[in-house]
Amino acid sequence: MKPEETEVWSPVPRVVTPGVTDSAPPSDAIVLFDGRNENAWVSAQDHTPARWLVRDGILTVNKKAGNIETRRRFKDFQLHIEWKIPKDITGSGQARGNSGVFLASTGPGDDGYELQVLDAYRNSTYVNGMGGSIYKQSPPLVNPSRPDGQWQSYDIVWTAPRFHSDGSLQSPAYVTVFLNGVLVQNHFQLEGQTLYIGKPFYKAYDRAPIKLQAHGDPSAPISFRNIWVRPLD
Ligand code: MG
């Protein structure tokens, strides 16, 4: 065998211009929040325009307005999102800056697949519900959380589940997550949708919005910024 026989020359990967920094959106990203407005988002409850608070380039949860989700629907994607637990957050356990990134929103409430957002800096709770967990399914591999008042980031690779035409599962969902640049979920195979009570199971869907959680815990609302997604399917 010659070296040339194992060389592949096509197709040539298309060119993507990276962002100015590694957290800035590359040229082929869909920007979901750039600090100016929340036009990419609607109320998950009734699909009216999102009513969270946009100020000084950041998006802050409005607990009264409920969850918000993207207008667009996605299947497989790479997602970048940054969030901040407010300085001097109060409360403990699940009531300390609780929010969440639902990688697929399959209903108006907390239906879907939740990557937990929660203060995880010296805050004790069940580990499969801490920040960086796939809620009630997979604790983070390590805890690289920053304290309240500091911006943190998730970089996520989501492989959506596939279903047969009769609704039965063809292939499960997988997720890889970096928290503040540190690997916390490594191609984790999900057992189904996030459930607060009971064992997870799959329910067929095709494309779904990405949803952010307005959790009803009594602590101060958290904020988001710099949200972008690259569809991969
Ligand atoms: Mg949550």
Image: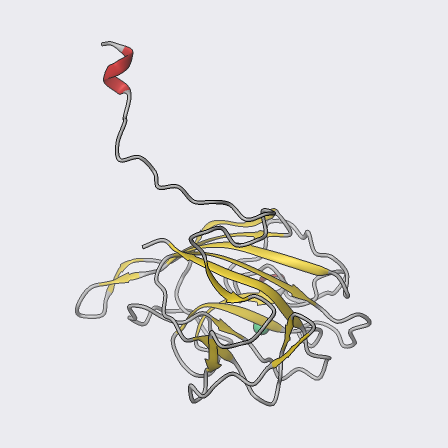
**Left/right of residue 147 with respect to residue 14 in the rendered view:** right
- Measuring from the top left, give residue 64's x and y in whole percent: 60, 90
- Measuring from the top left, give residue 17's x and y in whole percent: 47, 45
**Residue reaching furthest left?**
165
- Measuring from the top left, give residue 43's x and y in whole percent: 48, 84
**Left/right of residue 188 with respect to residue 116 in the rendered view:** left
Residue at image position (58%, 80%) is 214
- Of residue 15 and residue 151, the one placed in the foreground of this image is 15
Can residue 129 be seen here? The reply is no
Using the image, determine if residue 25 lies above or below residue 90: above
- Measuring from the top left, give residue 132's x and y in whole percent: 60, 59
Using the image, determine if residue 212 lies above or below residue 169: below
Q: Quadrant of residue 225?
A: bottom right
The C terminus, quarter of image:
bottom left
- Of residue 54 and residue 208, the one placed in the foreground of this image is 54
**Left/right of residue 141 with respect to residue 39 in the rendered view:** right
Using the image, determine if residue 35 lies above or below residue 17: below
Can residue 77 be seen here? The reply is yes
The N terminus, quarter of image:
top left
Using the image, determine if residue 216 lies above or below residue 84: below
**Left/right of residue 149 with respect to residue 159 in the rendered view:** right
So how many labels did they put on this image? 0
